[in-house]
Amino acid sequence: MELEKKYTLAKVGVLALLVVCVLLGAALLKDKDEPIRIDDLSAPAMPKSLESFSKSFSKEFKQGQDQAFDMLDKFFDEGFFKDNSDPFQKMEQMRRDIHKKLEKGLQGPFDDSWGDWYDARFTGHDSFSMSMEDKAHAYEYKISIPNRSSQDLKVDVTKDGIQISGTLNKVVEKKNADGEVTARQEVASTISQRFSLPDDANYGSAKITNGDDQIIITVPKV
Protein backbone atom coordinates (compact mmCIF):
# COMPACT_ATOMS: atom_id res chain seq x y z
CA MET A 1 0.00 0.00 0.00
CA GLU A 2 2.84 2.37 0.91
CA LEU A 3 4.65 1.57 -2.34
CA GLU A 4 1.51 2.28 -4.35
CA LYS A 5 1.11 5.61 -2.59
CA LYS A 6 4.69 6.61 -3.39
CA TYR A 7 4.24 5.61 -7.02
CA THR A 8 1.09 7.75 -7.26
CA LEU A 9 2.88 10.75 -5.76
CA ALA A 10 5.79 10.27 -8.15
CA LYS A 11 3.42 10.13 -11.11
CA VAL A 12 1.70 13.32 -10.00
CA GLY A 13 5.08 14.99 -9.62
CA VAL A 14 6.27 14.07 -13.09
CA LEU A 15 2.99 15.13 -14.67
CA ALA A 16 3.31 18.44 -12.83
CA LEU A 17 6.79 18.71 -14.34
CA LEU A 18 5.27 18.28 -17.79
CA VAL A 19 2.79 21.11 -17.29
CA VAL A 20 5.47 23.48 -16.01
CA CYS A 21 7.90 22.51 -18.79
CA VAL A 22 5.46 23.10 -21.62
CA LEU A 23 4.38 26.45 -20.17
CA LEU A 24 7.98 27.53 -19.71
CA GLY A 25 8.85 26.18 -23.12
CA ALA A 26 6.11 28.28 -24.67
CA ALA A 27 7.40 31.33 -22.80
CA LEU A 28 10.97 30.72 -23.98
CA LEU A 29 9.92 30.34 -27.59
CA LYS A 30 7.71 33.43 -27.41
CA ASP A 31 10.35 35.81 -26.07
CA LYS A 32 13.92 34.65 -25.48
CA ASP A 33 15.14 38.06 -24.26
CA GLU A 34 12.81 38.42 -21.27
CA PRO A 35 13.60 36.75 -17.90
CA ILE A 36 11.50 33.70 -17.06
CA ARG A 37 9.10 33.97 -14.14
CA ILE A 38 6.37 31.46 -13.52
CA ASP A 39 4.32 34.23 -11.86
CA ASP A 40 4.06 35.92 -15.27
CA LEU A 41 2.76 32.80 -17.03
CA SER A 42 -0.91 32.28 -17.69
CA ALA A 43 -2.49 29.05 -18.86
CA PRO A 44 -4.07 29.68 -22.28
CA ALA A 45 -4.83 26.89 -24.70
CA MET A 46 -1.54 25.30 -25.70
CA PRO A 47 -0.50 25.14 -29.37
CA LYS A 48 -1.35 21.88 -31.06
CA SER A 49 2.29 20.82 -31.02
CA LEU A 50 2.46 21.18 -27.23
CA GLU A 51 -0.89 19.45 -26.79
CA SER A 52 0.43 16.56 -28.84
CA PHE A 53 3.61 16.49 -26.75
CA SER A 54 1.58 16.48 -23.51
CA LYS A 55 -0.62 13.57 -24.60
CA SER A 56 2.34 11.55 -25.85
CA PHE A 57 4.30 12.23 -22.66
CA SER A 58 1.43 11.03 -20.46
CA LYS A 59 1.10 7.88 -22.55
CA GLU A 60 4.83 7.15 -22.40
CA PHE A 61 4.93 7.76 -18.63
CA LYS A 62 2.41 4.99 -18.10
CA GLN A 63 4.81 2.64 -19.90
CA GLY A 64 7.88 3.73 -17.96
CA GLN A 65 9.75 6.76 -16.66
CA ASP A 66 12.74 6.28 -18.99
CA GLN A 67 10.57 6.61 -22.09
CA ALA A 68 8.91 9.71 -20.67
CA PHE A 69 12.23 11.40 -19.95
CA ASP A 70 13.41 10.46 -23.43
CA MET A 71 10.53 12.56 -24.73
CA LEU A 72 11.70 15.49 -22.59
CA ASP A 73 15.18 15.10 -24.11
CA LYS A 74 13.69 15.35 -27.59
CA PHE A 75 11.56 18.37 -26.62
CA PHE A 76 14.52 20.23 -25.10
CA ASP A 77 16.82 19.48 -28.05
CA GLU A 78 19.39 21.77 -29.66
CA GLY A 79 16.70 23.48 -31.73
CA PHE A 80 14.91 24.53 -28.53
CA PHE A 81 17.92 26.69 -27.61
CA LYS A 82 18.65 28.00 -31.10
CA ASP A 83 19.88 31.61 -31.04
CA ASN A 84 19.68 31.66 -27.24
CA SER A 85 22.86 33.29 -25.91
CA ASP A 86 22.74 31.69 -22.47
CA PRO A 87 20.19 28.84 -22.26
CA PHE A 88 21.73 27.37 -19.11
CA GLN A 89 21.11 30.56 -17.13
CA LYS A 90 17.45 30.51 -18.13
CA MET A 91 17.15 26.81 -17.33
CA GLU A 92 18.62 27.44 -13.87
CA GLN A 93 16.11 30.25 -13.33
CA MET A 94 13.41 27.82 -14.45
CA ARG A 95 14.58 25.30 -11.89
CA ARG A 96 14.54 27.81 -9.03
CA ASP A 97 11.04 29.00 -9.95
CA ILE A 98 9.76 25.42 -10.16
CA HIS A 99 11.12 24.55 -6.72
CA LYS A 100 9.62 27.71 -5.26
CA LYS A 101 6.19 26.95 -6.68
CA LEU A 102 6.24 23.31 -5.63
CA GLU A 103 7.92 23.61 -2.23
CA LYS A 104 4.75 22.37 -0.54
CA GLY A 105 3.24 18.96 -1.11
CA LEU A 106 4.79 17.86 -4.38
CA GLN A 107 8.41 18.88 -3.91
CA GLY A 108 9.61 15.50 -2.58
CA PRO A 109 8.58 13.20 -5.43
CA PHE A 110 8.78 16.01 -7.98
CA ASP A 111 12.31 17.05 -7.03
CA ASP A 112 13.68 13.51 -7.28
CA SER A 113 12.43 13.07 -10.83
CA TRP A 114 13.07 16.60 -12.07
CA GLY A 115 16.46 16.92 -10.36
CA ASP A 116 17.89 13.73 -11.83
CA TRP A 117 16.73 14.60 -15.32
CA TYR A 118 17.80 18.27 -15.09
CA ASP A 119 21.26 17.55 -13.67
CA ALA A 120 22.01 14.98 -16.32
CA ARG A 121 21.06 17.26 -19.21
CA PHE A 122 21.73 20.84 -18.19
CA THR A 123 24.93 20.82 -16.15
CA GLY A 124 27.20 19.79 -19.02
CA HIS A 125 28.48 23.36 -19.31
CA ASP A 126 30.19 22.87 -15.93
CA SER A 127 32.32 20.10 -17.42
CA PHE A 128 34.98 22.56 -18.56
CA SER A 129 36.27 25.97 -17.55
CA MET A 130 38.62 28.49 -19.11
CA SER A 131 41.02 31.02 -17.61
CA MET A 132 43.25 33.64 -19.25
CA GLU A 133 46.63 35.00 -18.17
CA ASP A 134 48.02 38.19 -19.69
CA LYS A 135 51.76 37.61 -20.04
CA ALA A 136 54.45 39.96 -21.33
CA HIS A 137 54.45 38.76 -24.94
CA ALA A 138 51.37 36.57 -25.19
CA TYR A 139 47.95 35.68 -23.86
CA GLU A 140 47.71 32.20 -22.37
CA TYR A 141 44.34 30.49 -22.19
CA LYS A 142 43.86 27.32 -20.16
CA ILE A 143 40.80 25.15 -20.75
CA SER A 144 40.38 22.62 -17.93
CA ILE A 145 38.45 19.49 -18.94
CA PRO A 146 37.95 16.58 -16.49
CA ASN A 147 38.44 13.18 -18.13
CA ARG A 148 39.90 14.80 -21.25
CA SER A 149 40.31 11.43 -23.00
CA SER A 150 36.54 10.87 -23.00
CA GLN A 151 35.72 14.24 -24.52
CA ASP A 152 35.47 14.97 -28.23
CA LEU A 153 36.30 18.66 -28.60
CA LYS A 154 37.62 20.85 -31.39
CA VAL A 155 39.41 24.13 -30.69
CA ASP A 156 39.97 26.77 -33.39
CA VAL A 157 41.60 30.19 -33.10
CA THR A 158 40.47 32.74 -35.69
CA LYS A 159 40.03 36.50 -35.98
CA ASP A 160 36.60 36.02 -34.39
CA GLY A 161 38.13 34.48 -31.26
CA ILE A 162 38.57 31.04 -29.72
CA GLN A 163 35.90 28.60 -30.88
CA ILE A 164 35.25 25.45 -28.81
CA SER A 165 32.86 22.88 -30.22
CA GLY A 166 32.19 19.18 -29.89
CA THR A 167 30.70 16.75 -27.42
CA LEU A 168 31.06 16.53 -23.64
CA ASN A 169 30.48 13.10 -22.13
CA LYS A 170 29.23 12.85 -18.57
CA VAL A 171 28.43 9.91 -16.30
CA VAL A 172 25.56 10.51 -13.88
CA GLU A 173 25.25 8.17 -10.90
CA LYS A 174 22.29 7.78 -8.56
CA LYS A 175 23.03 6.54 -5.03
CA ASN A 176 20.82 5.28 -2.24
CA ALA A 177 20.92 6.32 1.42
CA ASP A 178 23.86 3.96 2.03
CA GLY A 179 25.93 5.56 -0.70
CA GLU A 180 25.64 2.58 -3.03
CA VAL A 181 25.30 3.27 -6.75
CA THR A 182 21.86 2.10 -7.86
CA ALA A 183 21.87 3.51 -11.39
CA ARG A 184 24.43 4.87 -13.82
CA GLN A 185 23.70 6.83 -16.98
CA GLU A 186 26.00 8.22 -19.67
CA VAL A 187 24.92 11.55 -21.11
CA ALA A 188 26.48 13.30 -24.10
CA SER A 189 25.86 17.02 -24.65
CA THR A 190 26.86 19.07 -27.68
CA ILE A 191 28.55 22.42 -27.01
CA SER A 192 29.60 25.40 -29.11
CA GLN A 193 31.15 28.43 -27.44
CA ARG A 194 33.24 31.36 -28.65
CA PHE A 195 35.53 33.59 -26.60
CA SER A 196 36.74 36.88 -28.05
CA LEU A 197 40.44 37.82 -28.24
CA PRO A 198 42.09 41.14 -27.32
CA ASP A 199 42.70 43.55 -30.20
CA ASP A 200 46.47 43.05 -30.07
CA ALA A 201 46.30 39.24 -30.22
CA ASN A 202 48.09 37.63 -33.18
CA TYR A 203 45.58 34.84 -33.76
CA GLY A 204 47.42 33.59 -36.84
CA SER A 205 50.40 32.50 -34.70
CA ALA A 206 48.40 30.85 -31.93
CA LYS A 207 49.72 27.56 -30.54
CA ILE A 208 47.43 24.87 -29.11
CA THR A 209 48.85 22.29 -26.67
CA ASN A 210 46.73 19.30 -25.64
CA GLY A 211 47.20 17.74 -22.20
CA ASP A 212 45.45 15.00 -20.25
CA ASP A 213 42.96 17.28 -18.49
CA GLN A 214 43.82 20.62 -20.03
CA ILE A 215 44.17 22.45 -23.34
CA ILE A 216 46.59 25.38 -23.38
CA ILE A 217 46.24 28.05 -26.07
CA THR A 218 49.08 30.53 -26.41
CA VAL A 219 48.30 33.59 -28.53
CA PRO A 220 51.27 35.94 -29.13
CA LYS A 221 50.78 39.69 -28.97
CA VAL A 222 51.27 41.76 -32.11
Image (spheres, rainbow, N blue to C red):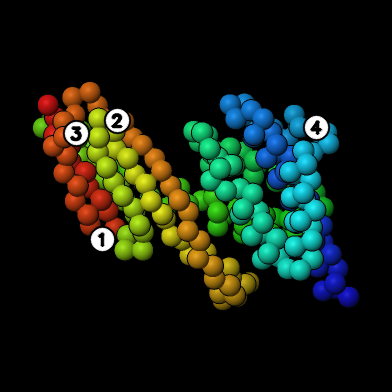
> 70 or 2: which is nearer to us?
70
In contact (CB < 8 Å): disc 4 and disc 3: no
Q: Which of marks 2 and 4 is in front?
A: 2
Which labelled disc corresponds to residue 212? 1
> 31 or 34: which is nearer to us?
31
Q: Nearer the viewer, mark 1 or mark 4?
A: 4
Residue 104 position (above or below residue 37): below
Q: What element carries label 3?
A: helix
Q: What element carries label 4?
A: loop
In contact (CB < 8 Å): disc 2 and disc 4: no
Residue of label 3? 203
Marks 1 and 4, how far apart at CA: 50 Å
Residue of label 4? 42
Marks 4 and 3, how far apart at CA: 49 Å
The residue lying at 63 percent from left, 72 percent from top is 177
Which labelled disc corresponds to residue 13? none
Residue 42 position (above or below residue 10): above
Residue of label 2? 160
